[in-house]
Image: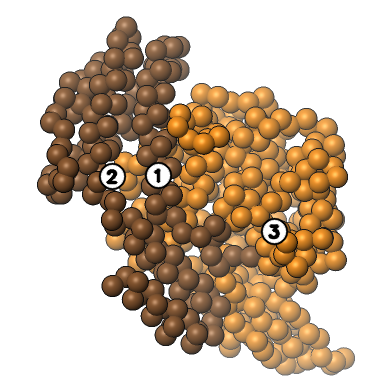
Chain colours: A brown, B orange
Amino acid sequence: MLEGVLISISCDIIPNLVNPKAHASAQMMQSIIQGIRQLLPVYDQYVAEEHNQMMEVLRNVAGAIDGSSGDAADRIRERATTLGAGDEVPIPLDREVVMATHRELGLALQATMIDLDELQRAGDADADAGLEIVRGHMGPRLVRDVQTFLVGDALLGRG
Amino acid sequence: METRLVDLLAEYFPDAEHIEITGFEPIPGGYSRETFRFDAHVRTATGIEEHPLILRKDPPEAISILQTSREVEHGLIEALRLHTNIPISRSLGHEMNRERFGEPAMVIQRMPGNSQTSDLFHDGPDAHQADDVMRHLCEVLVELHTTDVSTIDPHGRLADPRHEGVDASSWDAYIDSTIEYYIRSFPTINYDPSIISVLDLFLTLRREKPRPLPLALVHGDFNPANFLYEGGRVTALIDWENSRIGDPREDLGWMTTMDILSNSNVMAHPVDEGGFLAYYNELTGFEITQDEVDYFTLFGTANIAVPVQAAIKRRVDGESTEFMHLYLAQSAGGTLPNLLRLLNYPGVPQ
């Protein structure tokens, strides 16, 4: 279906556009639709994998700052024993439930990063290791997202 | 629109007996302002003058990415035109009254030259000009960065043009207050938990400040789409809306980012000078290192990421229906691998 939309934009719309800005907009629409076509087949599997991996990250960060003290360190440990200790999700998944917990875990990683920054600025070297764990999880994941969703190699509609 | 434009032009050409507009059409690109090209034929008592012009208009506030002032941009352009040798359009004037065009607007001279700068790269038709054009582009940037700020901005309107509490009274104050603005803005851009890398970016910038350099006037969107060229020379540096007082390394860092996003190669030229950074250092004596450029690549990315990601969030939240903001959500991903690489994320190809 999406392929049909792309073909229609190419064959029915773009040849009839005389306005260059409308032409660029049509190309942007094609780019987004193609990105979604690439993302759809793998999206649910990515979400489930990321869900389980984020739980592990929360636990590992708490382990890395095991000797740290203070409010930020306590908050990190709290997340590991709550969000990080839940059930891993099966694949294939119950989509609505997993999407909600996936988001909750993602926000927990953001909060963890803020707490790690507080520890780092206080000179806690263990927090550096904790940040490496978060980055080690997010890096390959974000690169994979970009590779899956990105279309073309330059911004459309510019020189 | 064209009738109202003629009325405005009559103010700029008081000796005109008759003004006619031809070829009025929108210009693609320019993600933040709406731009239209046209030719004004101005008849006076002594003859007919031909003026190639551009109407540069704000989009409606709800879908605007950068909230900037056409009045400030007009003042900057005219100050640069009068006090420097930087190739720049003349700004005829600005219209801040929304009754005329719906939103504030300005009219600027349309400069000669090729705006398809992709022709300079990857065996494009003008690839043989790339070294000369980038040499001149670097010289233009150096002139901008070494011009006395008080000459161009005597009233300090470029110290904090976004009105976000940025303090440009010293380098440390500028960097600290700008990063605080980024961090404070995070809730306004956080449309998905995967934005964590942008949060990491802001926090890392705060922890790892480089050495200071004298603050300067920076272009603020120095990228491969914002200059015109002809015959091996830059004919115009355009799109000054994000210009401000800042660290000169911001422009170098942003060009590095946009080279990636635009699939261009500005920073590799001029080859015989060892590339853009080496030539810039030769001209300025700033001795900027690649690590410093990397920091300001991140800093500049943050500076644009805040308004761009905020626009995407407004679109995701349903506050606007602007289609292009959806496209930005996709295309901005092209900067992510480089951002992760500069932050030394494990598992990201270096």
Taking the image as shown, residue A64 lies to the left or right of residue B335, namely: left
Residue on which the image places disc 3: B122
Residue on which the image places disc 1: A144
Q: Check the residue under mark 1 and report the chain it is in.
A: A
Using the image as rendered, state which of residue A26 and residue B180 is in the foreground: A26
- Residue drawn at point x = 39 percent, y = 12 percent: A126
- Residue drawn at point x = 16 percent, y = 33 percent: A88
Using the image as rendered, state which of residue B11 and residue A107 is in the foreground: A107
On the question of residue A112 being in view, the answer is yes
Query: Crowding at label 2, few (<14), some or many (≥20) Cα neighbours within 10 Å?
Result: some
On the question of residue B82 being in view, the answer is no
C-alpha separation, residue under disc 1 versus residue under disc 3: 27 Å
Residue A116 in the image, given as x and y percentages of width and height = 37, 21
Disc with the residue nearer the chain's start (1 vs 2) = 2
Q: Quadrant of the C terminus of chain A?
A: bottom right
C-alpha separation, residue under disc 1 versus residue under disc 2: 9 Å
Using the image as rendered, state which of residue A99 and residue B20 is in the foreground: A99
Residue B48 in the image, given as x and y percentages of width and height = 81, 90
